Amino acid sequence: MAEQEKEAALPQKENFSEWYNDLLQKGEIMDVRYPVKGLYVWYPFGFNIRRNVYNIMRELLDKDHQETLFPLLIPENEFMKEAEHIKGFEDEVYWVTHGGTSPLDVKLALRPTSETAIYPMYKLWVRSHADLPLKLYQIVNTFRYETKHTRPLIRLREITSFKEAHTVHATWEEAAAQVDEAIRIYTEFYRRLAIPVLPSKRPDWDKFPGADYTIATDALMPDGKTLQVGTAHHLGANFAKTFDITYEDVNGEQVYAHQTCYGVSERSIAALISIHGDDKGLVIPPEIAPVQVVIIPIIFKESTDVLHACENVKKELEDAGVRVKIDASEDRPGAKYYKWEMKGVPVRLELGPRDLKNNAAMLVRRDTGEKRQVSLENISGEVLSMFKAVQTSLYEKAKREVEERIFDCSTHDEIRQNITKGIAKVFWCGRKECGLKLEDEVGAGILGIPTGQEPCEGKCITCGADADTQVYVARTY
Ligand code: 5CA
Ligand code: ZN
């Protein structure tokens, strides 16, 4: 990259789209210049963030799921078995039709999601109630021929980081409990990313093709639109009937199993960088940051002492498990600050001759800019406690932002006035007709009924009939 290009500042975050695209490039997350629409390339720095994020996901799932890996290609006959599922995906599937120059006997679909790859095997694997529950997941690429505007990390034609879990249970109720559990796992996952999410039950017309119902988690983006960053689906016995997944129950009878599936993609990283980033670049929670502390030696003339002290600090931090870099390049300190701020390094440590005399260093927080002089005596303790403070305040700040941007509305006009700022919360009678009319008139979508909503009473915002639930309405990605 040319020096000048590197130095150019980001557009203000208020111009969200421009800011986002620029940040992906300057923060070295994704290169968007790959010559196929909807496909992008991970820079190594972005990929490092991805690895840290998915390690959290693995840690959460590995408690009671097992990781697996299924093939990318799905034979047409399997893919075409579940009617609702086909209807939902047929316009989005890429087909492999040839091997070399010979047409294939059976066309092969590139998985848009893996139900139809996995469930024929589940038919073989599930035999008795002792095999249940079965909870597997994989992290793979999936392909969807998206026709809406594609965007890096947000709407991809090759989703490179699709985490999909597929579970099998004895009863409908157990599957329902697993859907709730999936939403708890996702809420915890996003909390580790310092992102508050809003879980809600999608209206019927927006559920996953082939599911009984869908619960989704949405994150509020800086431009006031929401991004669906995870979904959990109750599949009932719908797929079990199609793929003949049965088990022998305690009475020795063959009965259909009940299933769930739930997924998260690199949209999680889109939300991460969008929600925390600022006009200076990335802001990355410590647990996820590829570089957690950058040490900047402040050198005047005789510098060996300072450099030596920096090496010692680096060693001590590394022994405490911290990912550290010393920037001893020729650049001016200001240029170094700029560079590492763009990269979102959570803590900067400055050390000069005067600090050294006092056996101290200066710590600077990336998220708030706050500076603190600390003793070198217990430097790893100071840094680790600053990490905690950063993590907490990133989450709290994002949470306040969401709370301030949910608006109770009682007319379509009121929704229209508030919807560019965030999310509207409104009473809805539950009738599809009213829901669709609402969406049409305000130019936004119903996300769904918040999970765990207290019973409430009001009038449907569209028809005025009695309503006992409120729903979120938002402009969505
Ligand atoms: N089989 C189910 C559960 S794994 C499934 O495919 N669900 S999904 O269609 O809702 O996708 C799961 C999640 O992937 C979505 O909630 C969304 O966050 C993400 N996602 C869906 N399509 C795309 C896309 N084109 N680009 C990036 N992320 C996507
Ligand atoms: Zn109504």
Image (cartoon, grey):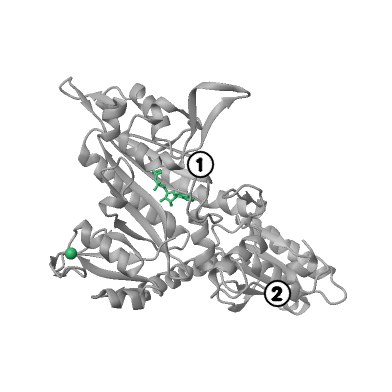
Q: Residues within 10 Å of mark 2 (few under 14, many from 20)?
A: some
In the rendered view, does 285 fall on the left or right side of 307?
left
Q: Is residue 256 left or right of residue 152?
A: left
Q: Position of residue 4 (x, y in %)?
A: 78, 70
Tell me the residue that label 1 is attached to.
143
Task: Compare residues 400 and 86 and report the one nearer the observer.
Answer: 86
Q: Position of residue 129 (x, y in %)?
A: 25, 27
Quadrant for the N terminus, please. bottom right
Residue sitting at 60 percent across and 78 percent down?
372
What amino acid is found at the position of numbered circle 1 in the picture? Answer: Phe
Work out which residue is located at the far left of the displayed protein and give it.
Answer: 466
Query: Is there any visible trace of residue 150 in the rendered image?
Result: yes
Q: Is 282 in front, or is 192? A: 282
The crowd level at tag 1 (other Cα within 10 Å; few <14, some 14-19, many 20+) is many
* Residue at the spot of label 2: 359
Q: Quadrant of the C terminus?
A: bottom left
- Name the residue at 26% across, 35% down: 238
User: Where 57 falls versus 113 (above or below)?
Assistant: below
**Which mark, by number, is residue 79?**
none
